Amino acid sequence: LSYLRQTLSLVTNPTLLSNDEIARTFPTDILEQAKFILHKIKGVGAYTDSQGSAFSRQSIAKFIERRDKIGQVDFKNVFLSNGASGSISMVLDALLFSEKDTVMIPIPQYPLYSALLTLKGATAVGYFFESKDDRWHLDSQILETAILDSLKVGKKPKAIVVINPGNPIGQLLSYEQMVDIVHFCEKYGLAILADEVYQENVYDPASEFHSFRKVVLQLQSSVPVASLNSLSKGFVGECGLRGGYAEFLNWDPEVMTVINKLASIFLCSNTVAQVALHLMVSPPLPGSPSFQLYDSEKQQILGALSRKAKLLYLSLNKMSNIQCNRIEGAMYAFPEVFLSPSACQAASALGIPPDQLYCLEALERTGIVLVPGSGFGQKAGTHHFRITNLLSEEAMQEVMGEFAGFNEEFHNRYS
Amino acid sequence: LSYLRQTLSLVTNPTLLSNDEIARTFPTDILEQAKFILHKIKGVGAYTDSQGSAFSRQSIAKFIERRDKIGQVDFKNVFLSNGASGSISMVLDALLFSEKDTVMIPIPQYPLYSALLTLKGATAVGYFFESKDDRWHLDSQILETAILDSLKVGKKPKAIVVINPGNPIGQLLSYEQMVDIVHFCEKYGLAILADEVYQENVYDPASEFHSFRKVVLQLQSSVPVASLNSLSKGFVGECGLRGGYAEFLNWDPEVMTVINKLASIFLCSNTVAQVALHLMVSPPLPGSPSFQLYDSEKQQILGALSRKAKLLYLSLNKMSNIQCNRIEGAMYAFPEVFLSPSACQAASALGIPPDQLYCLEALERTGIVLVPGSGFGQKAGTHHFRITNLLSEEAMQEVMGEFAGFNEEFHNRYS
């Protein structure tokens, strides 16, 4: 986004502001925004509060209030981090103390969660999304089955991770599903780690993103929620800057004390991302000089992602032995590929999972990078892969053609 | 540094480069540098390799070769991180597996180490620097005593942390002391975590910084060394950008595999700091358009730090009941303050350590922030505080006057 990058250049090099010839090439609202930021933080060179600069956390608090239209957000409950990953790691550190500690995570899941749980010496209880009627399905019964299995072996989960919209499966939870999850958490005393980094990436015009914070407040529930968001997704897409935040609702003050202490170990998150987070949640207002360009860039990015999600869904379902659910949100499809016994034997001979054979051959024969479903977890005996809708629209058309050719050839070869 | 900030503004907002009117206000070597970086990484918006961008790691490898004038550095052994803290955390994760695992750390120490060891469920074995003849002293006997005490309770350290120049005590190890440490590590099979983030901050004209990498190579030793460096110190001082690196020498390939895996959990370190690290180790060459300003800024910063270190040392030693060792490097003095029984009783009545009482009163009465020695560790029965040489030169003169007044008044009050 030009708005973001223009402001960052002024904030990293404030001498540009004092050169009239240069300053006049920038929209006036961007000059004002840069001066406001520099007034607040006196430059990006110094450490900030370990939680992050107050001005950026205040902007985020206001953004959450505007988005959810319920309750107030105290910026003291907002923590900035290097990517949302930094927040996730911190929350898990605050919750996990021994090998008996466990957290519920979705399967398929984003591998950060299993990796961090392993690193911290804890374990995961998986709850499996089911493929049903062209969508990824989750209900209370699935959650109950998972937690009862865990309780049977003496492990009581402390929290549940919900990725919504989902990575890698691209599902979007309905309001009713979220209500069920909150009631489930009340019943078993779980906190919710709401990984909502794809909240701007919703493709089904009939659906809407709801935050767990909003649902919990509307239910007047006391379930603790850590809401995660990021610079890396949405239409901002600044993954390289590594900016994210966690906002805490209903957490025990003692846990918050631990979280404060944990945040201070690494001094603070990087200041450029702190500034970028403020910019992400403080877009130009209609009528301001930079609004038109900002809005057209935003609509272009979101429109293209939506068209490509549809193209991905339609193209995949036309291919033999592939079934792809609707892509409701996020940036991925996670189709099932039906592999023949002969493909499974060939993989077994190589000592790799069958979906890995499929993905490796796709890479070798076409250059297309897919991620095998086994990297995210999947029901035993099923095979999936993850594919993104991040290519350009022109490239996507061509790539899907090549991929269809590969898929046909693969299944013929192993028929 | 103007060189660094000017380049960062072009890299974060490349449209500045395509506007001739703006571009002509930048020195030509900075334009070239920005184009080179953008050619290498295609912008700061995307994830890089988990280890960091190759171009930045290659620049760091060349810098280390130029600095040490011995051996070659493979950029594949250089890992970029969000501050040196990120690297330290990663190395400790690779080394520590159980509660029995332990690492030797200096006392007084930078609290990051004790905090991370506690977080990771491991323990620290402290080796105590001794105050002797106006300097902080360390020898093999001190290390032997510390490790033998640890072995007696069944804990074999895996590594030793050496902060050189030191935080908080400002010592600089001699070449001979470093040789002794390497031999000690050979004897007990320890790796060295060489925290060398203050390598540019050396104030004694008769002394010189030596890297542990150089000493190990010159001794033809096989002791593993992780060399840490940072954007935050030296004369760059860009703490807010959160950039650091670790360079690995002599490490077991299996440990390197674990380190690679750990680096990948958080995707990558922030790209702005990756670019800044490249700039830090690739300064303008003499004769280039931006050299003169760069060099004058560098000399000004280092000269002022050196003068302020001297001022700090002289002022503190003029005060009653304070003894300060020579400040050989880093950015701190760690003087001993001799507190009366009456001061100790007053602290005890408040339930705080005596040095904390001293520091709190200094804060309340003068606004000067000192850090109590008990935060870093000190020999039982002694009391210290940490004070920095980071104020401006004018402010420093005035502040030392105020501080001397407070110190006099404190000791009189508790005499």
Image: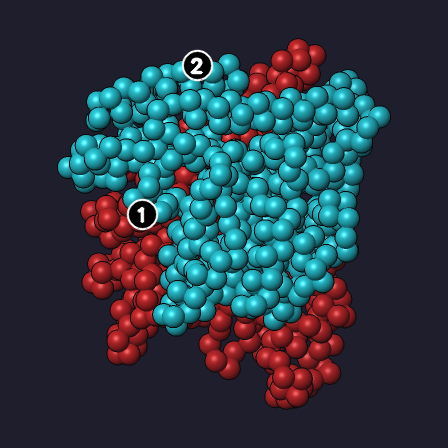
Chain colours: A red, B cyan
Q: Residue furthest top?
A: A20
The x and y percentages for residue A308 are 62, 52
Which residue carries the number 2 mark?
B398
In screen coordinates, is A73 left or right of B168? left
Q: Amino acid at mark 2?
A: Glu
The chain letter under disc 1 is B
User: Would residue A205 be seen by someone viewing this image from the given angle?
Assistant: no
- Numbered label attached to residue B95: none
Viewer-proximal residue among B389 and A66: B389
Quote the CA–CA distance across marks 1 and 2: 33 Å
In screen coordinates, is B211 left or right of A75? right
User: Would residue B197 be seen by someone viewing this image from the given angle?
Assistant: yes
The x and y percentages for residue A214 are 31, 45
Viewer-proximal residue among B303 and A272: B303
Quarter in which the C terminus of chain B is drawn: top left
In screen coordinates, is B277 left or right of B357? right
Can you tell which quarter of the image residue B199 is in? top right
Label 1 or label 2, whichever lies nearer to me, is 1
Viewer-proximal residue among A132 and A32: A32
In screen coordinates, is A295 left or right of B250? left
Can you tell which quarter of the image residue A77 is in? top left
Viewer-proximal residue among A244 and A280: A244
Q: Residues within 10 Å of mark 2 (few under 14, many from 20)?
A: few
The chain letter under disc 2 is B
Give the residue drawn at x 27%, y 19%: B409
Q: Are marks 1 and 2 on the same chain?
A: yes
Label 1: which secondary element: loop
Q: How many marks?
A: 2
Q: Residue furthest left?
A: B349
Which residue carries the number 1 mark?
B380
The answer to which of marks 1 and 2 sits earlier in the sequence is 1
Q: Amino acid at mark 1?
A: Ala
